[in-house]
Amino acid sequence: MTAIDFGSVSFTADRAAVAIALQQVADRYLDGMEPTVAEAVRYALMGEGKRLRAILLIAAYRASGGTGDASGLAAAVEVVHAYSLVHDDLPCMDDDDVRRGRPTVHKAFTVSAATAAGLAMVPMAARAACDAAMTLVGDPRVAGEIVRTLMSASGAGGMIGGQLLDLEGEGDRIGSESTRTGASPQDGRADQCVGSDWRARGRCQRVVLGGIGTVRRCCRFGFPDCG
């Protein structure tokens, strides 16, 4: 995998670009949604986070040779992350009242609204990723593969599976070896994303998905608290 030169990353500028892209995602995709749920989604998306996953994706995209604006695709990854936090904070999960210095979504609204908002953010992320990928590379097949990769990383074999392990391990000590064992299938899948199969599908696909692969590996297992 191509190494990321973090010296070339402009955290302030990239974070600002992702914030703008998230605002555009909210403005574009919340129209027509039930008002309370829409407000809960907007509340979750606009929270003050470090956006490290998004910045890593942008950095990986550039390191792989990308020259376009990947902030829209990075925003889609942030939508997935924000959704995971909404559900993580629910009473049936971590039961947290405060997130990033303000009430969690289920405290600011209701448990029902927060649950529905998290669910609504999954297809929103898929739509945002698809549209951003089409803008970036213009190939429906590449866009479809990007969405598939993102949703696979977000599903039961990835992030949601990690949430289940978190619940099952409540009160237990889980060492680094357990984390690495759980990470192995995802690491393998991410490695495939930057292998020879990608090259056969074209440089654009390798460039964009390389960013997602890096975010999956670094943030899911290397930096679990990089929210």
Image: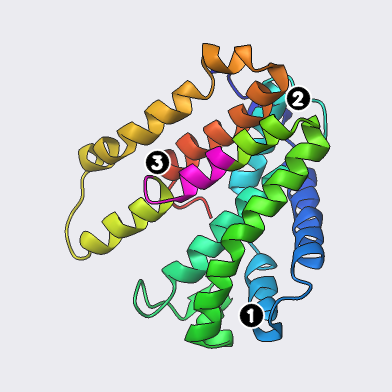
Crowd around label 3: few <14 · some 14–19 · many ≥20 (10 Å): some
Q: What residue sits 49% from the left and 61% below the top?
A: 84
Disc 3, SS = helix
In the rendering, which numbered label is found on residue 216? none
Query: Dominant secondary structure of the magenta stretch?
Result: helix
Closer to the N terminus: mark 3 or mark 2? 2
Coordinates of residue 40 in the picture (x, y in percent):
64, 78
The amino acid type of the residue labelled 1 equals: Val
Report if residue 83 lies within the magenta region: no
- Above or below, 5 relative to 219: above
Q: Which residue is identified by label 1?
A: 37
Numbered tag placed on residue 66 in the rendering: 2
Tell us which disc is closer to us: 3 or 2. 2
Classify 10 Å Cα crowding around label 2: few (below 14), some (14-19), many (20 and above). some
Dot 1 or dot 3: first in sequence order is 1
7 and 111: which one is in front?
Answer: 111
Q: Magenta stretch: give its range.
A: 148-157
First of labels 2, 1 by sequence position: 1
Helix, strand or loop at label 2? It is loop
Q: Are marks 2 and 1 in contact (CB under 8 Å)?
A: no
Rounded to the nearest angstrom, the CA distance separating label 3 from label 2 is 25 Å
Residue 217 spot, x, y in % from top left: 46, 35
Identify the residue at horizontal 76%, vertical 46% (top origin). Answer: 131
Q: Nearer the viewer, residue 206 or 21?
A: 206
Q: Is residue 36 left or right of residue 189?
A: right
Q: Helix, strand or loop at disc 1?
A: helix
Residue 221 disc label? 3
Q: Which quarter of the picture shows residue 149? A: top right
Give amino acid for label 3.
Phe
| Crowding at mark 1 (Cα within 10 Å: few <14, some 14-19, many 20+) | many
Say left or right for 204 vs 67.
Answer: left
Quarter of the image where one finds residue 6: top right
